[in-house]
Image (tube, rainbow, N blue to C red):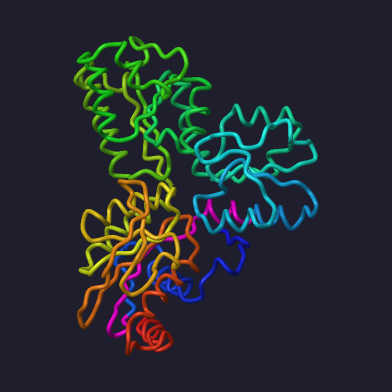
Amino acid sequence: MKHFDIPNYYKSNLISRIKELRKDDDPRKKNISPTKLDFGPVRFFIARHFGFCFGVENAIEIAYRTIEENPGKNIYLLSEMIHNPGVNGDLLNRGLKFIFNTSGWQLIDWDELKKEDIVLIPAFGTTLEIEQALRKKELFIETFDTTCPFVEKVWNRSHSLGEQGYTIIIHGKYFHEETRATFSHSIRNAPAVIVRDLEEAKILCSFILGKKGKEEFYEFFKGRLSTGFDFEKDLSRLGVVNQTTMLASETQEIADLLKDTMIKMYGAESIKDHYADTSDTLCYATYDNQEATYGLLEQPADFAVVVGGYNSSNTSHIVELCEQKIKTYFVSSEEKIISKNLISHFNIHEKKEVETNNYIPEKDVVDILLTSGASCPDAVVERVMLKLLSYFKGTRSIESVTNELFSEN
């Protein structure tokens, strides 16, 4: 695996050492149980896999190298480099500007860009329409393209399905930058429709089976359909791809549901003519993080803390998994841990920050599960852990706990 040059203040000696220890001990990640750090009155259970992934580190390296090598130049980001407020804030402080916000609203007009300017494409990739607009400005986008290779893999899969005459069903959040990019690349040579979740997939299946009519279909999927989508023709051959940060289990459920629906319509003997069995297009880091979360949740604990950007798709899905089993607090940084008795955290259902009092139970030993999303620096995870640790009296030293951990291994 390639090693990237990212700023040291995103790294953590403690977290990195734990990751390296687990990697050396279990390189194939067969053991997804968490790492225990026993400080006496509080014990932390750290997920087997979390934090910066290949695509994120690649994007960060390119962004910071571009700043360093181009002093005095106007440098723009199409939108957030990754969904982490600390990283994006630091880039903005260094003079970079966003052309779009995360919802796709244009903040800087194309006319303001000159051909000597630099525009960075984020890890999510971008649409063909935006690529074309950049090329018209004679900007060399290939040099500053940080699109994650796993996102490009999805685009390639979509292209292959389109060439075989399949309609592309995209499992993703239609407002997300990555899904908008995948939709744009998919409709080059195929019809496409975006489904947000299993419930929307069930609605799609009701149209396929003729339980609902054409006009209702166009209205329900308005804004999520390729131009000229043919209701009678384009739902007869289907292939599924996904936004790389969606829940793997839900993508599989959607794929299974669509396959079963096509069997009902056309029969099992001709299913290959109507449904393309595609292997999952989820990225390795999203999959590993989700599997590690399942392993983390096997550990009994008092509550879980998930660290990451509130608009991070892969992080919100980790929160979703944790909430099914345990009280969970989703925080963007240690600053959200206000005191021993008060925490400010993001409610993914209400889409807003809320405050909770007395979140740390009064007991002799408190057990805390800790993990983060793929766009969260290890340094932030460590600061969250140390902030929580500071509220307990009579704790063992970090040195003694880590020495014990490494001597055991």
Whether residue 333 is situated above or below residue 18 in the rendered picture: above
42 inside magenta stretch? yes
**Number of disc labels:** 0
**Residue under the image location 37 percent in, 56 percent down:** 289
Depth order, front residue of 225/147: 225
What residue appears at the point 45 percent right and 19 percent down from the top-left corner?
226
The image quarter containing residue 148 is top right
Q: Is residue 387 magenta?
A: no
The residue segment tinted magenta is 38-61
Residue drawn where x is 28% and y is 60% of the image: 328
Image location (x, y in percent) of residue 18: 43, 73
Measured as percent of width and height from the top left, residue 208 is found at: 26, 18
The quadrant where residue 19 appears: bottom left
Residue appearing at x 76%, y 41% in the figure: 117
Above/below status of 207 relative to 247: above
Above or below 90: residue 223: above
**How far from the left and from the top, in percent, is residue 313?**
41, 46
Quarter of the image containing the C terminus?
bottom left
Instruction: Answer left or right for 166 relative to 199.
Output: right
In the figure, is residue 125 to the left or right of 350? right
Work out whether residue 276 or residue 4 is closer to the camera in this orientation and state it: 4
Residue 286 screen position, x and y as percent: 40, 51
